[in-house]
Amino acid sequence: MMEKLRALDLHYADVEARLSAPETYEDPALVARLNKEQRELEPVVMAYRTYQRRRQDLEDAEALMGDPDMKELAQEEYQQAREELARLEEEIKVLLLPRDPNDDKNVIVEIRAGVGGEEAALFAHSLFRMYSMYADARRWRVEVDSVNETELGGVKEICFTIEGDGAWSRLKFESGVHRVQRVPETESGGRIHTSTATVAVLPEVDEVDFELNPADIEMQVFRSSGAGGQHINKTSSAVRLIHKPTGTVVECQQERSQFQNRDKAMQILRSRLYEEKVREQEEAVTAERRSQVGTGMRNERIRTYNFPQGRLTDHRIGLTLYRLESVMDGDLDEIIDALVTADQAERLRAREQDG
């Protein structure tokens, strides 16, 4: 591990030197690449340099233990340095884990009402609001790509893009079945109903990552419509794309022009097919090692929102919080941090098992 860290430290110093050279700035693409490299290397290199300093502190304290006047102070410093080194070693192990290549990408989120009729549609809308508020708090941009609304303010399904630094790294564990337990607004008897909504989170994929064959795609155009079938556009600007080999269907109707809707639908289709390809590869590799955090399968129940108790439970990691109101207002960091930590711990165990 130390050999690898020394090599990363040298590479980081080289990147810094190149960024200090005036001639580097003649090539904007090179500057962007070096800045990205520097950002990615910085956490592990800084941790390694701190580790080296604390190791020197340990050696200095050990040398002073032979001096009777300094022995007590040296023992204290020695213990502090040992504890700090152990903590840094664990931190560095996590930082050295292979990085998800999609972590910096934007995401496409699809939410569909499941079991529960109108209440499920209202819950799907609540989830959209929750993710939108989380994105706003992080200064990310939310753009609705397509929506099928109900007359009572719910959504049967909604597809939207979240653009922002690290969106995939934070939201990738949200895929799965979300279950709600509450008294619906339409319920006169005060009985608690259980409803579900399905969330799928996809990394936004560009043409370089995944190429589509135009011959495989059938395009249909139709008029955009809002809740209750009211036409919000008198021209046929909405677009439906059908990927013939897989039967995957994507619609986009939020943009004013047919061309914009087609481009957006193509982006969503590419991301869906890319996700399916990656999933097939992962299943082939990890069939015998199922992740605790979850596979992100759309039929996997991941979380329960219990409104009468004000309780949220994430079933993958056994996390329970009694502050449901703030969660529904987009305060998701505690949940997401716990999921990221669980994923890191699992990947560390897998690496140790693999030797």
Image: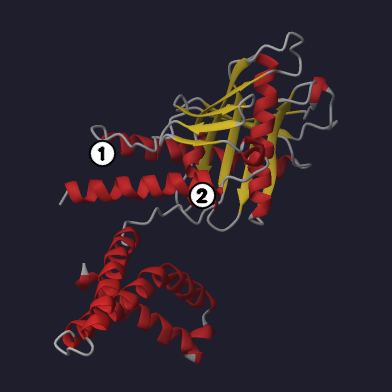
The amino acid pointed to by label 2 is Arg
Q: Closer to the camera, 319 or 225? A: 319
The quadrant in which residue 58 appears is bottom left
The amino acid pointed to by label 1 is Val
Q: Residue at the location (39% across, 38% down)?
A: 293
Q: Closer to the camera, 214 or 333? A: 333
Can you identify the residue that label 1 sits on?
Answer: 285
Q: Is residue 250 visible?
A: yes
Residue 189 in the image, given as x and y percentages of width and height: 73, 8
How far apart are the two marked residues, 2 and 1, measured between alpha carbons? 24 Å
Q: Residues within 10 Å of mark 1 (few under 14, many from 20)?
A: few
Q: Is residue 239 visible?
A: no
Residue 277 in the image, given as x and y percentages of width and height: 39, 38
Q: Closer to the camera, 50 or 278? A: 50
| Front disc: 2 or 1 | 2
Among the two numbered marks 2 and 1 on one chain, the one whose residue lies closer to the N terminus: 2
Q: Residues within 10 Å of mark 2 (few under 14, many from 20)?
A: some
Q: In the image, is residue 117 above or below residue 305? A: above
Residue 194 in the image, given as x and y percentages of width and height: 59, 17
Can you identify the residue that label 2 sits on?
Answer: 170
Q: Secondary structure at mark 2?
A: helix
Q: Secondary structure at mark 1?
A: helix
Q: Residue at the location (37% across, 56% down)?
A: 99
**What colouring method underlies this structural image?**
secondary structure
Q: In the image, is residue 349 above or below residue 240? A: below
Q: In the image, is residue 189 above or below residue 236? A: above
Q: In the image, is residue 163 above or below residue 324? A: below
Q: Residue at the location (51% across, 38% down)?
A: 174
**Which quadrant is home to the N terminus?**
bottom left
Horizontal side, residue 183 vs residue 295: left or right: right
Residue 279 in the image, given as x and y percentages of width and height: 38, 36
Horizontal side, residue 55 vs residue 126: left or right: left
